Image (spheres, coloured by chain):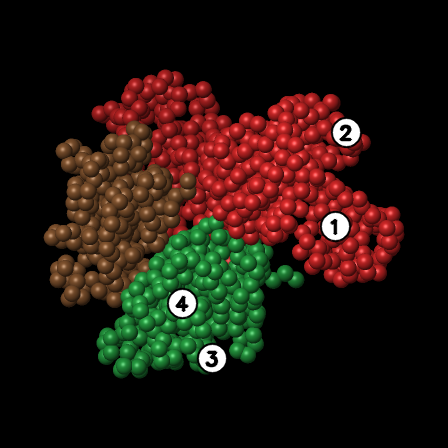
Amino acid sequence: MLKLYDYELSGNCFKIRWFLNILGIEYESIPVEFYPGKEHQSSWFKEINPLGQLPVIDDDDLRLRDAQAILVYLAKKYDPSGKWYPADDARRIGEISQWLSFADSLTGTISSARLATTFFFDFDLEKCQTGGHRLLRVLDEHLWFQEKQQLEWLCGGAHPSLAEIACFPYIALSEEGGISRQEYAAVRRWIDRVKRIPGFTVMPGIFPAGA
Amino acid sequence: MNSLETAKSCSTYSCWHPLFALEDLEEGGVPVYTQLLGQPVLCERLSESKVSVRLADQQRFPDSQAEDLHSQVQYGFVWACLGPTPQPLFDIPEYHEADRRNVCTGVFGVEVSAPRAIENFLDMGHFPFVHTGLLGIEPHTEVVDYQVTVSNEPNEIIVTECLFFQPQAAVGSAGGVVTEYVYRVPHPFCAILYKSCPFDESRRDVIAIFVQPESEERIRAHTLMSIVDPESSDTSIRLFQQTIFGQDKPILENQFPKKLPLDPLDEVSVRADRAAVAYRKWLASSGIRYGVIPCTDVT
Amino acid sequence: MISLNGDAQKEWIPVASGTDLVPRHVFHGRLLDQDLAIWRADDGFVNIWRNRCLHRGVRLTIGTNDGAQLRCQYHGWCYANRTGSCTYIPAHPGDSPAQTLTNRAFPSIEKYGLVWTTLGNQPAVPTVGVLENKNIVVLRAVPINAPMRIVCDQLQQQAQRFDRSDSRDDSKVEVISHGPMNVEVRKFADSGDASLTFFIQPVDRDRSVIRGVLSSDQEPAEPMSLLRFFSSTLNEIRDHIESNQVTASRDPQKTPDVSSLSPELFHRGAGDERYAGQSLTVRVSEKRLEADGIVALELTSEKGVLPAVQPGAHIDLCFPGKHTAQYSLVNGPTETDRYIIGVKLEEDGGGVSRYVHDELQKGDEVRISPPRSRFPLRRDTVNTVLIAGGIGITPILSMAKTLSHVNLDFALHYFARSERHIAFSREVSRLGSDAELHVGLSIEKTQDQISKILEEYESGTQIYVCGPSPMMEVVKRMASEKDLPESMFHTEYFENPNAIDLGGAFKVVLSRSDRVLDVPQGKSILQVLQENGVAMRSSCEQGACGTCLVKVLSGNPIHQDVYLTETERRQGNWIATCVSRSDSDQLVLDL
């Protein structure tokens, strides 16, 4: 059975739990106490991922770190529809990769702000918040223009992609780091649409959309 | 009135307040900063169980030998009092039982006042909506009448006969059952929950929240689990409580005003809020002014 | 609350685009430091509410919009479309929330593709001449971290950026200022007769939103390219303004200091004024023959919104010279713009039903009471059984619609004398397989059917029954024979089938005023109270509706009503003053 090194309150781990739920894949969750235990920096975990970061999966003999990389692997291997990551469509996977990198920037800004305010990590809070707002502004404008073209998702096409999975969690948790989404109306609508994707699951800090 | 003056104007000044879980401080390590009642304080763990806490002005005198504050280690936490004559800290006898698992779950920062956090801790009506599938589940939303008493000696609020249908009440239990809770508020910013222990019906698990007011509208919430559970690991005990707290955080941070309004006309209470109503009255009659919006005086 | 100038509070100001308010979504607006929850119901109505649940102050913008109500995320309190009234409190599923629990609402108008509101009283609707009768394209709104006045000034100064032509120096861009919140720009390059109108929405003292609208006679040839151009130009202007601004607090989570409260900030419900007095005037917007002897009326208000309806509620219909009569509302949660009732012709009634059938016309005015909710519906049950007989379908149908809307399991059993007697058949059939019709059954067959329904009872089910008294008595008798718990059984009698005995004299003591009144044989407590100047509400005056209930502090009531449950009667804490009497020499009442 697929193993996931997991922490309940991590947005990056949530991406994997969520996508596995969409794909209907059973997995074993191995808790790693990120906080307060800092278990991700322990020697036993560093043998699993020398970067000391979550999530990591073990699937048969493959061990993968990095949420975005894991998503790509899971999509290619387990999504028969090929809709989450259409590997043959150069244009689309180019777009998706853009947003996977954007998700990394979100981790470095919005997620860090949340770690600073909630778990007292020593980050420059104001810098993280300013960075987060800059990204949300870009995202809001992008989504507004998508809506104008009757597109509901980050990339083209009628179906959500890995871009949604990668970008959603930290954006949805942004307010925990003091980054309000009040002025990002298009982002707020996108959040509702993402919550309604079949197979959506929650994590602490994220509430389900209504019917 | 600034934060410190507000604190000094009421009994919060002579209360003990939690700062750190002792295990989070390195013995003989570098002193660590935190904020209490609007004041930066410096905390140092001198030996296994000895600590020192002092006021410090972080920007101007980073290593200042400012005056020592009253401090103690209790229930696994470092407590400090800003004022000169601290009142005695409340008692949790269960903590000292030999087979208890005493676990600190890790402190959470929340942008809200301490009294709002306490009131949330006392509330059951939100279980099906905020802790869905864990502490409550729709459509079992009814809060039946329960009892509230305020005792004088010690001056505490006790809430009993709280019954609620829960799908999974604790990390060691399975299935759903009507759980009985007892709540106790022995301190303006601390509350304790007693619930039936799934491993031994005759005893009760204890979950306590000790709220450190960094300022009137920002807190560090410390949680102590003092439970009878021979099976679960410390990590899994912590993770369950962290999940619960992580679900409460966005609710608390979306409450306005952040300070707790004490005037009963400011917010609508229903019968399910008996404990909250009693808590607000208790704060008002105790003269607490920190983190609250006092009743407007109507002559 | 800041006021940029007193006038800004009174103006109509756009706070969203119409297209922002998508279905099943709650938009987070903010105007002059007032946080707003803005949502469009499925019927199109735009609600603009103060963004604060009345219970514990949680933002309604983190709640959910189910098309007809907004549900708070904290304790699930439900607030109805249009009225803003709380219609359900999950912690107390058997109670009806007081109608005073109403959100502070602000008016909404959609015009020129934008959604407008005003924080003050502004009767006239916004009119912008240059936008009237034009083709409108709403630009992307640009939030900006700068105060309104600076944005307004800068927009005028930077307007030449809207000129797409190469030589900006020869720009012929015309800028017209229409006040601190409205800037018009014309003659930007080859715009022809098109004009840009910018509304500057003051969010708070440090932030604004630029809401631009392009108006022209014809639809633009390449709207997307225009939208992108204006979006990027406004971004440039925004960046220019912001770089010259001292960085203000970014965090709108901080509210202004509320320690010195304006009472308005915690005003519990602007709806209070609506319910002053006990009657409303409505107009008959539709009258139709629903079934044999049953007329359906739809009633609408010309003056603002009708008070919220909870399932099972009823209104009083008052006609001069006739007795008041009560009618249950058939409304479901999505029907908030009118009241729907079914009126059965009663041969020996007080004339109201005869008047409604024979004389009342579409367009007539009617005096009614606000809805009273004495037959509330629990929404905390896994399964609900609804039994309706004849005209009893009216409250039962509103319950079915509510349960259907919130996706709770239920079964509706509707007993009707014949096909011709089936009322609201379209709505019943919309319930699909959840509704079962039992038509033309004999008394024995009806009893068999009811017995069968009650046989299938499972623990946790709630049963609601409304119909002719004989049917209700049968159901009650069978339920008691089968030992079904009283607490799961809810009935509404339209009339009290029992004979009322007004015998025996006694005294009542009014505890709050220390008055003692004699209640002689032949007079009800209610009559005596009213004759002695005690303000008492009443409706059916036969012990069926619960309106005249008074708390009993001591004494032994003799209950002759059909409203209180057996348990409530035994506890003796309440008395229906219109019919009930006293076993003891006196009753002490909480009046």
Callout 2: SS: loop
The residue lying at 47 percent from left, 60 percent from top is: B178
What is the letter of the brown chain?
A: A
- Determine crowd level at label 3: few under 14, some 14-19, many 20+ residues with C-alpha closer than 10 A: some
| Amino acid tagged 2 | Glu
Image quarter in which the C terminus of chain C is found: bottom right
Callout 1 secondary element: strand
Tell me, yes or no, whether the two marked residues, 3 and 2, touch with CB atoms within 8 Å.
no
Looking at the rendered structure, which numbered label has been put on residue C347? 2
Discs 1, 3 touching: Cβ within 8 Å: no
Amino acid carrying label 4: it is: Pro
Task: Using the rendered image of the protein, determine whether residue B57 is visible from the camera's viewpoint.
Answer: no
Output the letter for the chain in green: B
Q: Are marks 3 and 4 on the same chain?
A: yes
Chain under numbered label 3: B
- Closer to the observer: label 1 or label 4? 4
In the displayed structure, would residue C345 be above or below residue A132?
Answer: above
Disc 1 to disc 4, how far (Cα)?
A: 47 Å
Task: Give coordinates of residue B38: x percent, y percent.
Answer: 39, 67
Would you name the residue on which mark 4 appears?
B198
Q: Which residue, given by chain and number where applicable, does mark 1 sit on?
A: C576
Q: Nearer the viewer, residue C154 or B187?
A: B187
Chain name for mark 1 = C
Any idea which chain is the red one in this picture? C
Chain of the residue under label 2 = C
Which is more foreground, mark 2 or mark 1?
A: 2
Query: Which of disc 1 and disc 2 is earlier in sequence?
Result: 2
What residue appears at the point 35 percent right and 19 percent down from the top-left corner? C219
Name the residue rendered at 37%, 29% in the picture. C138
Whether tag 1 and tag 4 are in contact, CB under 8 A, the answer is no
Q: Type of residue at label 3?
A: Gln
Amino acid under label 1? Answer: Ala
